[in-house]
Each structure stands twice: as structure tokens, then as C-alpha cells.
Amino acid sequence: MQEALKNTIDERNAVIDEVKKFLIERLNLYQEPQDTDEDTPLFGSGLKLDSVDATEVVVMLDMSFGIKVEEGTDPSFMRNINQLVDFILERKRATDAAAAQAA
Amino acid sequence: MNGLLALHKQHAKELVSVNGIDVPKQYSDLDKEYSALRQNVALSDYSHYSKLKIDGDEAFDVLDLAVAGDVAEIRDEQTLYTVLLDQDGSIITDVYIMNDDDSYVVLSEHLDDAALMTLFKDRMGEFEDVEMTSLTQSHAIIAMEGPYSWELAQEIYGMDVIGIPFLGFIALDDDTYLLRAGKHGEFSYKVILPVEDAEALWTEIEEKGVRYDLVKAGLALHELTRLENPYFSPTGNGRVSRDPRELQLQWMVRYDKDEFFGRERLLEKRDEALVKKIIGVVLAQEGEIDAVCAGDSVVCGGKEIGTLVACRYSPSLKKMIAQALIDEAYAYAGIDAYAIKTTDGVEFKIKTTATPFINNYSMLINPNENSFVNPDKFRNMLEQLEAKQAEAKQANA
């Protein structure tokens, strides 16, 4: 595997692990991390989170990743773990790019 | 022949026999059917679902032993969507289990009536106080589906419809139910009712549906919609794997349940290293590409890392989408370093992605505030938000 690809996957894996750890520990889910697939729906039939849990996820984004979710943000980023991870990585890259430009 | 089937024979473009029941495969035009399901309301006949009523003091015990999900999770008027596994821990079919006051109705679209009943009888173990009654021939299933199907269903069944949560249902009469469940990401209401009442209801929905630009739809539509919003499909992802881990369907099983059919082998497999996994891929270039199909290779830097499982053009994304079974080390979303290599050796760049592939329009609709037919209300929350922002901007000017 090429180095650049390996780095991309490692970066994603680290965020996946952190998100799963948060969901399982903070929201008291019965699943183990390896039993929680990245495309598992967070709401409805999958992990069966509710609106209170959604608020916890928003708090987690702020506390763990420094991401503020503004009013009117498309809520589809909370559809499953993969989409949540996409959202985190996109925001992180945007922040890094802005910091690089400012430097 | 029942009245509903006679109607279909008269009006549908093509019928298909599934589980021994004739239902529309296509009603008119697939593009129109797709658009109705994704934008307003589609009307479908799902009578081909096998329907089994399970009663008795030990009905819960039999069901809980037979399926991989936790039947104890569902209270009255709630439904469990789970899977039946074989001894090897592989998925046989997905099923809905509806709890109607501790009497249960099981729905399965991939097993015929006899096979479903045999499967449960084989799993009864020492339990005896169980009565199984088939509702398959006696009952039809009519579905209103799409972002505004709740509004049409509400016209027919009243305000209670809005209060039905996903996988909830209300009992309308003896063995007659309104179930909110679907496999395409849009609002979906299935009416399970005696066959003799089905024609009248179909006609009523059709008449009331005119205001919603309702389109009658067949089963063929769902070969696409269930790829856009992936579910277990014996003719799609189920052709290459029946393993819940490989299919990313572990949420349908409860590893921590004490006992269920297939559990032992499932737990053994869970301890083994995962070799391959299904993920979503989207072609980089826009448009419908006939050259790409299931069976094509997925490559990374010239190395084969997987195979396309199912592939179609998504009108919502205007791109080809596919599920691919990929080597586990490469099976991550958000990667644009891979390509599809067709049998002719042509390569198409792809990006791996989270599934569902599309953001369903139903997610933008709040039944308490939006409407398709009321001009005083916004169609969706996005329009509502834009109007609110414009109003605020005007006030500040």
C-alpha cells in the first residue's frame, strides 16, 4: 500500500476509533467497537439513538474535535459513523487549510 | 383472482410472481416511479411478502430463539427489523417482527410462506404452546411511500399517522395494520389488510393521491432504490456474502443475546480476522456508463483489491453507484485512490463512500410543519429556513 494512502486510512481509522469509543461509552451502547460497522445507522433501526443522544454527539464534536455545529447545518452528517467521520475530517482539513493560509 | 390483482392486470405494464403471489413489477415508467418515490408519493402492492401470525404463551420464546435480533426490545405496536441466520451464522433472510399485544406478525419478502413456516417450526425446540397462522394468501399489503406519504396516509387514517415512529404500527382492526417501515430511506406506510378489502383501499388511495401527484409503482424500482439505500438483498449483496460482518449488517444481530439460531458459529467468526467488507463506491465521472457492471474488479495501483457486487445509475446523484466487496485493509470510505477495471481493461476512477449514497428528501420534511398540498405551509425545512433567514435579513436592513 502506498504511503499516502496508508496515511489517509490511518487518519480516518483514528477518528473512527474515537467516535466509536465516544458513542459506546458516553451513550451506554451495548455494542463492542468491532461490532459497530461504520455504515450502521445512528438513528432509527441501527444504534437507535434519540434526539438527546444527538445533542451529546454535537457536544462531543466540540469537546473532542473543536468543531462547532452551526444552526442550519445539514443534519445528514449524523446519519451514520462514516458520515460523522467525513464531517470531522472535512472540518479538520478546512481548519488546517485556513491556518496554513494565515501563516 | 382477487379484485386488486384484476386491477393490476388491467393497468400495470408488467406483473411478476414472487413467493407465488402476482404483483406489479412495473406500473408505467420507471423514471416516473422513481421520481414519485423520491419526491412525493408512490403507491405499491407488496402482497408478495410472506405473512405469518405467531400466537401462544411461548410465541416470544420461539421467535427470540429463531431470529438474531432481540425480540424483547419491542413492545406493543413496535416492530423489530432483523435477520434469520442458518447454522453457519449466515443470513437467510431479513424479517420484520411486529408485536401486537404479545401476538406477533412476521413479514418476509425473500422466503415463501411454506419456507418461512418450516423455518420457524424447525426452530421451535422444546416450545409447544405456539400457534402459527399464515396470512399470506388472506392478506394483502398496500404501501404508500415517499416524502409526503405521511400526509396522504393521514388523510385516510387520521392524525395518529404522524405519531407513528419508524418501525411503529397501529392495529386498525383484527389482523389489519398500518406499519411505518420501508427499505429506501423515505417515509413509508404499509397497510396489511384482508385481500377482499384491498381493491377498495387501492382505489381510494389512488383517488386521494391525485393531489400529491401519486404514481403507481412496481417492484423493479427497488433494484435501484435499495442500492441507493443498501439493505440485505439476496439478489444484490447477498449473492456474494451472507456474513453480517462483511455486509456491515451487524446492527441486525445481538451478539449479547444468550441464545439464537446460528449464534455459536457467528461468535466464532466474530473472533476471526475480517478479510473483506462491502463498501459503497461512486464513479468520479457523471452519467450512465454501460461498460461498468457487477463482477468488474476494483484496483489500487494496478493491484486487484475487490469486486463490484451491484452497480446502477443513480438519478439522484447523476452518477454510477455500486457496492463493492473490498479487502478489509482497503475498505474505508472517503478514499479516491481506487478504480474500477472492466472486463475490457478500461479503468474508471471511483471514490469510496458512506452509504446510504443519497440524502433522502424525507429527511428534510417535518410532518408537523411542512405540506405538499397546503399552500400556507413550506414544502420542506430547507425552504422554511431560507425564508426565515431572508426575513431576518430584511428586518436587519
Image: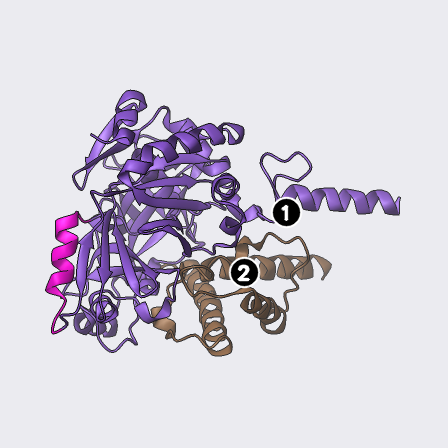
Chain colours: A brown, B purple
Pick the front one: B226 or A93: B226
Find out whether residue B290 is within the magenta segment. Answer: no
Toward which corner of the image does residue B24 lie, by quadrant? top left
Check whether the beta carbons of the residues at disc 2 and disc 1 lie within 8 A of each other: no
Q: Secondary structure at mark 1?
A: loop
Q: Amino acid at mark 2?
A: Leu
Residue shown at 27% from the left, 29% from the top: B3
Q: Is residue B206 visible?
A: yes
Pick the front one: B125 or B351: B125
Please state the horizontal and vertical placement of residue B314, each as a whole percent of the image. Answer: 41, 37
Q: Chain of mark 1?
A: B
Eyeballing the image, is B31 above or below B59? Answer: above
Q: Main secondary structure of the magenta part?
A: helix
Toward which corner of the image does residue B310 lie, by quadrant? top left
Pick the front one: A81 or B90: B90
Q: Amino acid at mark 1?
A: Glu
Q: Quadrant of the C terminus of chain A?
A: bottom right
Do tags 2 and 1 sit on the same chain? no
Eyeballing the image, is B31 above or below B244? Answer: above
Please state the horizontal and vertical placement of residue A60, each as a whole percent of the image. Answer: 58, 71
Please state the horizontal and vertical placement of residue B394, each as a whole percent of the image. Answer: 84, 42
Residue shown at 41% from the left, 44% from the top: B282
Left or right of A75 on screen, residue B101 = left
Q: Is residue B272 visible?
A: no
Q: Quadrant of the N terminus of chain A?
A: bottom left
Q: Residues within 10 Å of mark 2 (few under 14, many from 20)?
A: some
Q: Secondary structure at mark 2?
A: helix
Residue lying furthest front = B174
Q: Which residue is mark 1?
A: B369
Q: Which residue is mark 2?
A: A89
* Residue stretch in magenta: B111-126
